[in-house]
Image (cartoon, coloured by chain):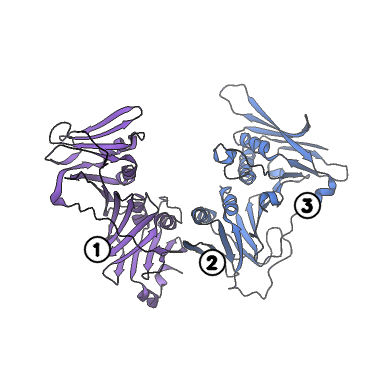
Amino acid sequence: MKFRGKITDIACLNHFTTFSRILKSAVCLNEADPLCSGVVTTISKLTKTCVLRLTPDHLFFILPGKVTNGGVGMWCQLLQANFFQEYQMEGVTSEVQEICLEVSPEPWSRALKTVQSAKSVKLKLTRKHCACLTVAAELPTLSSVGRVVTHDVPVDVIPRRLWQEFQEVGVPDFDVSVYLPPLKTMKSVVDRMKNLSNFLVMEANLNGDMNLKIQTDLVSVTTHFKDLGNPAGGDVSSQDGGPSQSRDPEVMAEVTVDIRKLQQFLMGQQVNPSKALCNIVHQNVVHLVLLHEDVSLQYFIPAVA
Amino acid sequence: MPLSTQSQSQDQQYVLVANLDNARNLSNILKAITCRDHAIFTATANGLKVTVEDCKCMQANAFIQADIFQEFTLKEDMVIFQINLTVLLDCLNIFGGSTAAGASTALRMCYMGYGHPLTLFLEEGGVVTVCKINTQEPEEPIDFEFSSSNVTNKVILQSESLKEAFSELDMTSEVLQITMSPSQPYFRLSTFGNSGNAHYDYSKDSDMMELFQCSTTQTNRYKMSLLKPSTKALSISCKVSVRTDGRGLLSLQYLVRNDDGQICFVEYFCCPDEEVEEE
């Protein structure tokens, strides 16, 4: 089992930086995470599991929807050829060209932070005191002598019998699929709503209408987005499971979510995606899909119990 | 639903309807008096007065005249209610509240009367947010009985000159002392903090002093915690008038220009700190 990758092209590195920023916000353990907000507090004991899956063509970064994540799941897929100038891997066996690694979130976050200011990056699977993903970032300096910062991110090789969970995510049988409104507007609204309530209702219909609603003893606030458009049947994963043809276009499918989870998703989106849509399974889960050129990001937010 | 298609019949149920093309013309001035959660809204034909009180010895009022609004319709002589000001501000700023070029949030504020919530319709870029905020029984605002005829000392200063002093005020000082006198030091702000005493003097001949009418020497102390919030009103104003009456009651009046250059007023009343004592 081997892996080695190198990014030396500046444009690719910038691209990778955009993607790692998205990942970094997803990896945030809680709002007070010092790596994300600059506030120094004790990190919560609940850590998220991050999985890095490598195939000859793709890199997948997965946060499985475990209870410790509050049920939020994230799936990010990149086409390796669009990032790496060198990419060599050998899977666990000669037939199975795949590697699945469980990655420690905190050191991975720190490594990503260094990558953001790097001139070039090398990634390599190594064995130090334990199996590690070594990230070596060459940083720009004023002198002619380069400076390299190396992070050894401890990883656990995931045995094949557990790989089931990390295969291509299936799109759930959703009730409504709708394009998202401008994320910047959504973020402004959700940020304010968070001051007023812990829970938010997200609902949408096949007429391209979406509402974000909060309701407490003190106040109720509803934001109406119209004419968003609905993707025709399929979606980016081109899986089966379009909404049933006989559904009344006016009827809303809704999910009540923890507002911080939605806010966390919106915080990571610094760049406008080329495509952004949302699949809603009534009172079950919100499945958000974003396409940034060649990075596809899927986020699952479950309904609150 | 777009603001413009609100049905006629629904309008007839409201005792108060106020429209603003730019919600910031209301939210900015309300931010200047936000020091407590609750505020009393009083609407009359003259416009809107929003009152916030603290400890029964400080009162802040924001006045937004009827002609600031694009529409201001009142079906009764006076409409009063109490509302959570921080919730109201979150709603008014739902689309971000920052000064993005060109983008402004339109507001329609409606109230059906006693027992009903205050309904806000906010629109920006085709997106509409509807907020319903519960109202409460209004408490009687204090009448400090501050009248112009009892004013002993008055100065009007350009806000610029006071902004620096107020932003640097020694917060370890429990009081802010204001001295006004027909002779030196004329107008002085003093603090007594852990690192020592600080004095800010403003001469009556200073360029910043637009009016100086002091007949007697008066020194009064006011609790810093009560006056510090007035810094917010100072920072958005262009002129401030400082007046005291025979009892040492302080009246600060701020002239504020909104985004469209229209004038609004903010006023602070503060009782002198009883423990004072030495001249």
Could you say where residue B106 lies in the image, as x and y percent from the top left? 39, 61
> What amino acid is at disc 2?
Asp
Nearer to me, A223 or B197: B197
As helix, strand or loop, the secondary structure at mark 2 comes to loop
Identify the residue at image location x=17%, y=43%: B154
> What amino acid is at disc 1?
Asn
Q: Could you classify mark 2 by the number of other residues whose Cα lies within 10 Å: few (under 14), some (14-19), or many (20 or more)?
A: few
Q: Earlier in the sequence, mark 3 or mark 2?
A: 3
As helix, strand or loop, the secondary structure at mark 1 comes to loop
Nearer to me, A62 or A5: A62
Chain A: drawing colour: blue
Residue under circle 3? A165
Chain name for mark 1: B
Could you say where residue A153 lies in the image, as x and y percent from the top left? 71, 35
Chain B: drawing colour: purple
Q: Which mark is residue B46?
A: 1
User: Image quadrant of residue B277?
Assistant: top left
Whether residue A75 is visible, yes or no, is no
Q: Which mark is residue A227?
A: 2
Could you say where residue B150 lies in the image, as x and y percent from the top left? 14, 49
Mark 2 and mark 3 in contact (Cβ < 8 Å)? no
User: Image quadrant of residue B123?
Assistant: bottom left
Note whether B62 is above or below A57 in the view shown: below
Identify the residue at image location x=29%, y=29%: B198
Identify the residue at image location x=15%, y=51%: B148
As helix, strand or loop, the secondary structure at mark 3 comes to helix
